[in-house]
Amino acid sequence: MVQVCVNGARGGADGAVVPLTPEAMADAVAEAVAAGATDVHVHPKTPCGRDTLSPRVLAVTLAAIRARSPEPVPVGVTTGAWAEPGPDARVARVRSWRALPDHASVNWHEPGAEAVAAALIERGVGVEAGIWSGTDGAERFARSPLGPRVLRVLAEVTDTDADTAEASARSLLAALDAAHGRPVLLHGEDGGAWPVLRLAGRLGLATRIGLEDTLLMPDGRPARSNAELVGAALAEWRRAAGA
């Protein structure tokens, strides 16, 4: 599986190719799915470009993406603390959603992660447990009674050095151990994005790519779209896997 992460917390300063409106996100998703993406992660945005968990913005964003997508694909969103400071406020937002995503990521090192995950599970939304390298997320997740109930684990390598990101990824995977038996999606960011994606291919793990994780193609030139990144990711993953 290659998930497309179309925008992340990036904003207008990161360039016009980063989709910020529901319509632009919908177009980006449709193109990425046509290029081979089979799952979607998106950050709904306020009109000023800030990540939000607002039920109104979420509903409009999901409707636009689902109407535009050439075929049904799971669509997930963030619940990152930066989008709604305060664990209680994040839980309240999840409970206020009128339209539901197929899944949502929960960063396990953030305060209140288990409460947010529990609220999502109660509403029938799949949980992607975001375990960041360089945090105590893996240790917290290992102790979590919700671990066996998550949809998948996002092994998120925050090391952006191309020379060391693979080693950081292997350390993170070792810390995750059996990950409660849940599927693991491995990905990196910025300078570490492509080395970690290739490692995912060699290990036969799901991965993701998109303008959230990197603005650059494997050869270092600026990416023109999420779809271009997805096409390159599939080629790199298959090459690394020996497929």
Image (cartoon, helix red, strand yellow):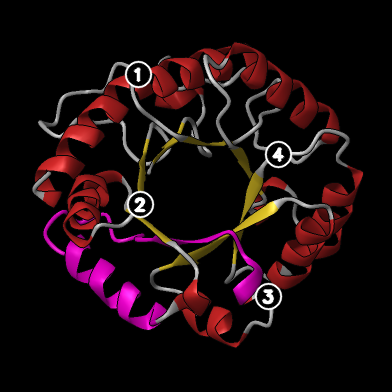
Tell me the amino acid under the disc marked 1.
Answer: Ser
Question: Of the residues tagged 1 and 2, which is closer to the observer?
Answer: 2
Which circle marks residue 101 in the picture?
Answer: 4
User: x%, y% of residue 154?
Assistant: 46, 59
- Inter-mark Cα distance, 1 to 2: 21 Å
- State whether residue 15 appears in this view: no
Q: Residues within 10 Å of mark 1 (few under 14, many from 20)?
A: many
Name the outermost residue toward the bottom: 143
Gap in Å between the C-alphas at discs 3 and 4?
Answer: 19 Å
**Mark 1: secondary structure:** loop
For mark 4, give the secondary structure. Answer: loop
Per the image, the residue denoted by label 2 is 206
Which tag is nearer the camera, tag 3 or tag 1? 3
Give the extent of the magenta segment: 148-177
Which SS class for mark 3? loop
Q: Give the residue pinned by disc 1.
A: 225
Report crowding for label 3: few under 14, some 14 to 19, many 20 or more residues within 10 A (C-alpha).
some
Q: Nearer the viewer, residue 99 or 131?
A: 99
Residue 100 location (% of width, % of height): 78, 38
Instruction: Return the residue at label 3.
Output: 146
- Across and down, in percent, residue 177 comes to 38, 82
- Marks 2 and 3 sit apart, C-alpha to C-alpha, by 21 Å
C-beta proximity under 8 Å, tags 3 and 1: no
Kind of residue at disc 2: Ala
> Quick check: is 172 in the magenta stretch?
yes
Amino acid of disc 4: Pro
N-terminal label among 3 and 4? 4
